Amino acid sequence: MNANNTLDEQLSALMDGELDDREASRLIGELQASPALQQAWYAWHLQQDCQAGHPLLSPDFMQQFSARLAAEPVVVAPQRLRRGRPMRKLLVPLTAAASVAFFGVALWQGVYRSATPAAQPMVAAVGQPVAAQAVAQVDVEAVRAYLSAHREAANNPLNGGEPLQTAVFKPAANQ
Amino acid sequence: MDSTPTPAQTARDADQLLVEKAQAGDKRAFELLVVKYQRRIARLLSRLIRDPAEIEDVTQEAFIKAYRALGNFRGESAFYTWLYRIALNTAKNHLVAQGRRPRLAGDVADEDGESLDAAALIPDYHTPETELANRQIVSTVNDAVAELPEELRTAITLREMEGLSYEDIATMMDCPIGTVRSRIFRAREAIAAKLRPLLSVVGRDKRW
């Protein structure tokens, strides 16, 4: 069987809907380019319609129609995903997988944030005396130096302030 | 799960491929669809319109309207289903414009037009020469089918008359699907060989 016969046989199968998508797509391209395949397409559909009992039209029906069609502006419509194409077949599972992944990431982020150390003080602080924690962490030496400097500044008459009542803070006296 | 497409699905996809080519600006692709569906549409319209010349005019008009509306075809239904509706509306509008009342000849409007008696619907066509040429074509096809070897005749008849898939024919004929495909192709070739002289007589038949 030569290449032309192979194409003809495929065209016959295409008419019967017995080619897969990829073969059909390639053969449609061949059909558009080959007058011999177009003649076969015409003759076989004529034969098919005769057997089905459909009425035959005038011999020049297609010629007249082609002339009318030639006078029509060319239709150019945006291409859409065709049913049965690989991408279209993958569209639904891919969309479902993307949705699952999105919710998975969102859920993981929520759980992860709640488990990070940065969030722990908010939880740990509940029921614990904040004052006790703060007192425990005070640097006594630093406080003492600060108060000493403050006292000196407060007692300076050039500052115009009242002398500081040192009786209030006497941590140094306890040392 | 079995994802093998059925013949109906792939036939629809073949139409869809041609529609997409036409939507991309290829008029030849649309002509291939007209070659395929012209007689089915004419048969449908013969249920509304009696005059053969009018049937052809309205058939042409329906295809032109379909071409103009092609940008709106989204492939949500089969191309023929969409074309069928356009053809019916075109015929009804034609009759209304003529001041006539649209009425289907059959009792039931079958989308495929398959449930009606075909012989009763075929109108007497045009000039006596055209009518003679068409009768010659029909009788040539019938004779060619009758002369086929039995296995080819059975395969093509089960396909064209019964609409069976290759798989079903293979089961009935107890042979591989590839053999069915080859037999149907060889049957078509044999019939077309008898038809071609009638289609190629210069000045008498300008079918395509």
Image (cartoon, rainbow, N blue to C red):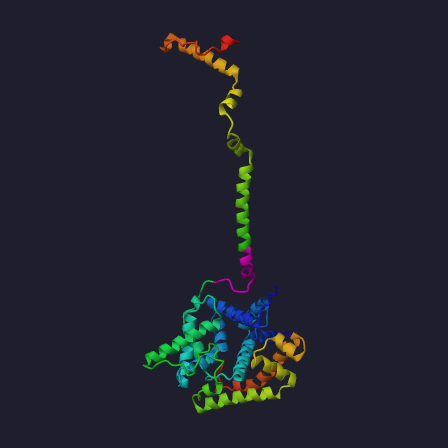
User: Looking at the picture, does residue A87 appear above or below residue B108?
Assistant: above
In the picture, measured across the screen, residue B138 lies left or right of residue B44, that is right
Q: Quadrant of the N terminus of chain B?
A: bottom right
Extent of the magenta region: A79-94
- Residue A125 appears at what percent x and percent y? 51, 29
In the picture, measured across the screen, residue B72 lies left or right of residue B142, that is left
Residue A91 within the magenta-colored segment of the rendering: yes
* Name of the residue lying farthest toward the right: B175
The answer to whether any part of residue B25 appears in the image is no
- Residue B179 appears at what percent x and percent y? 66, 77
The answer to whether any part of residue A131 appears in the image is yes
Residue B115 within the magenta-colored segment of the rendering: no
Residue depicted at x 43% and y 9%: A167
- Residue A136 appears at what percent x and percent y? 53, 20
Residue depicted at x 52% and y 41%: A110
Residue depicted at x 51% and y 62%: A81
Q: Quadrant of residue B146?
A: bottom right
* Name of the residue lying farthest toward the front: A127
Residue depicted at x 52% and y 65%: A83
In the picture, measured across the screen, residue A36 lies left or right of residue B75, that is right
